[in-house]
Image (cartoon, helix red, strand yellow):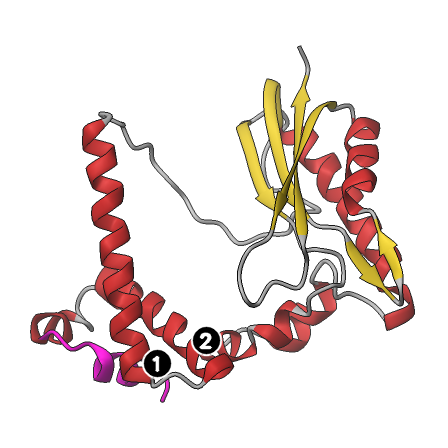
């Protein structure tokens, strides 16, 4: 089952089915629930219709909760823009960005392409090109760790470049083990950040919960530019 035909089959509300092809917002919204269901089917063989309806209802519940909090605290929503690019060469001017929050690849602990192949194929992503360029997967097995650190150092340099002075960058990362050796990514990232010019403020260590977690802990690293 692929694309709009498969999504239409799982849209159980007739008005959503009727508007699916005319309103891209509805199509993309349903596609999100469908991709969650596709992941559930891929990993735990949950029935697709059951998974789709369950994920759709959960997304709707979260939206209602979000708007309840928004209205309660009178939060004004800003504008957003989604861009596809390369973190090693950000297409922003120097000092253009107010703040950064990112969760970078956890070294080579996870093959993100293999894990999400079902979704990437559904979205018609160029898999060979992605594998050749993706941070953490680039290169031959013996070169992956070295390439990962080279790429992440470039990425952190770019974060520093595009941030405004007196602004913050938050990076979430986990330590991983490769061939029996623990890679202390959090310490390497602090080293890269300070080398770029960031002031290191603090690290928050937090447990990773969930049945599919491959790592026990991850680290939230807080940097500041200037000031």
Instruction: Classify 46 as above or below 216.
Output: below
Question: In percent of the image, x 73 and y 69: which residue is there?
Answer: 132
Closer to us: 168 or 84: 168
Disc 1 and disc 2 in contact, CB within 8 angstroms: no
Residue 39 marker:
2
Closer to us: 167 or 175: 175
Q: Bounds of the magenta span?
A: 1-13
Q: Which residue is mark 1?
A: 3
Question: In percent of the image, x 23 and y 80: which residue is there?
Answer: 10
The spot of residue 214 in percent (x, y) is: 66, 64
Kind of element beneath mark 2 = helix
Q: Residues within 10 Å of mark 1 (few under 14, many from 20)?
A: few
Q: Main secondary structure of the magenta part?
A: helix
Closer to us: 164 or 190: 190
Q: Quadrant of residue 135?
A: bottom right
Instruction: Classify 140 as above or below 224.
Output: below
Q: Quadrant of the N terminus?
A: bottom left
Q: Quadrant of residue 49?
A: bottom left
Q: Residues within 10 Å of mark 2 (few under 14, many from 20)?
A: some
Kind of element beneath mark 1 = helix
Q: Is residue 26 magenta?
A: no
């Amino acid at each position: 089952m692929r694309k709009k035909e498969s999504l239409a089959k799982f849209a159980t509300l007739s008005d959503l089915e009727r508007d699916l092809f005319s309103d891209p917002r509805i199509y993309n919204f349903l596609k999100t629930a469908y991709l969650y269901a596709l992941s559930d089917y891929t990993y735990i063989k949950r029935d697709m219709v059951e998974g789709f309806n369950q994920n759709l209802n959960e997304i709707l519940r979260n939206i209602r909760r979000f708007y309840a909090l928004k209205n309660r605290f009178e939060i004004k929503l800003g504008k957003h823009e989604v861009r596809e690019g390369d973190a090693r060469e950000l297409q922003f001017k120097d000092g253009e960005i107010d703040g950064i929050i990112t969760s970078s690849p956890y070294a080579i602990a996870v093959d993100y392409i293999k894990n999400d192949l079902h979704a990437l194929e559904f979205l018609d992503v160029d898999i060979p090109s992605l594998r050749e360029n993706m941070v953490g997967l680039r290169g031959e097995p013996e070169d992956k760790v070295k390439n990962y650190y080279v790429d992440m150092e470039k990425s952190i340099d770019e974060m520093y470049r595009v941030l405004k002075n007196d602004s913050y960058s938050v990076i979430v990362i986990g330590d991983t083990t490769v061939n029996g050796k623990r890679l202390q990514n959090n310490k390497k990232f602090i080293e890269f950040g300070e080398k770029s010019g960031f002031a290191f403020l603090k690290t928050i260590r937090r447990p990773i919960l969930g049945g599919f977690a491959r790592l026990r802990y991850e680290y939230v690293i807080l940097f500041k530019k200037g000031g």
